Image (tube, helix red, strand yellow):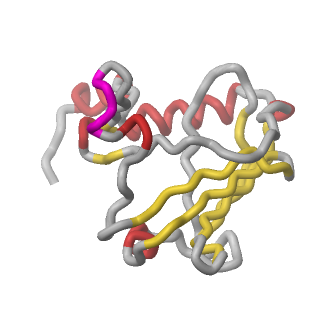
Amino acid sequence: MARRDWHEWHADYDNPDSGLARRLSWVQDRITQPKENLVPYEVQLVRVRDGKVLGHDKGELHADAQWKPLEVYFHAGDGDASPELKAADVLGEDGAYRIRFDTSGKLYGTYSFSVAGGKIPLQGRQLETTEPASRIVDYLYGGRYRSWWIPRKDGDAKISP
């Protein structure tokens, strides 16, 4: 492993895309946010072909005016202690999939996507055929990872305490 200068390592805290900055934000939220702003959520990843729930996650999120990403880690099986679902478990089978997101026991929305040839194709305004001024281009971590912008459908629940 390459050695890094102490000051260089700490610079990652100033980069909002770094794992250190995201972890620091998460810890600060847990310390500073009042408990009454917590809203329970549950999310499921469903294979449309047979309705099988491939993965699930549940927890609490902060309902406040500041937008923050929610990182979901799907777990395979029935219990929270089950192993995290691997990307290969989904990308290995072409077809349609849906994510169901509930808050406070009510449907917040569903998010549909497909897998083709071991990849999740872009959709909507992420397509290269979209007019450049309207196109969404988003490369997480400097292009190392891809993100997908999937429109929310169904559901009318609000995220509020």
Determine whether 13 is above or below 80 in the image: above
Residue 92: image location, x then y, percent:
38, 76
The reply to whether residue 141 is visible in this rendering is no
Q: Which residue is drawn at 49% across and 39% down?
A: 23
The reply to whether residue 62 is visible in this rendering is yes
Quarter occupied by the N terminus? bottom left
Total marks in image:
0
Determine whether 145 is above or below 113 in the image: above
Asked if the stretch drawn in magenta spans residue 33, the answer is no
**On the image, which quarter does residue 91 sit in?**
bottom left
Q: Which residue is drawn at 37% across and 48% down?
A: 122
Q: Which residue is drawn at 56% across and 55% down?
A: 112
Q: Which residue is drawn at 70% across and 26% down?
A: 32
**On the image, which quarter does residue 158 sit in?**
top right
Determine whether 91 is above or below 131 in the image: below
In this view of the protein, which residue sits in the foreground, 71 or 131? 131
Q: What is the magenta segment's predominant secondary structure?
A: loop
Determine whether 84 is above or below 36 in the image: below
**On the image, which quarter does residue 157 sit in?**
top right
In this rendering, position of residue 118 left or right of residue 101: left
In this view of the protein, which residue sits in the foreground, 3 or 22? 22
Residue 69: image location, x then y, percent:
55, 36
Residue 121: image location, x then y, percent:
36, 55
In this rendering, position of residue 144 left or right of residue 159: left
In this view of the protein, which residue sits in the foreground, 87 or 22? 87
Residue sitting farthest toward the left: 2
In the image, the segment drawn in magenta is 128-132
Asked if the stretch drawn in magenta spans residue 129, the answer is yes
Residue 55: image location, x then y, percent:
60, 69
Quarter occupied by the C terminus? top right
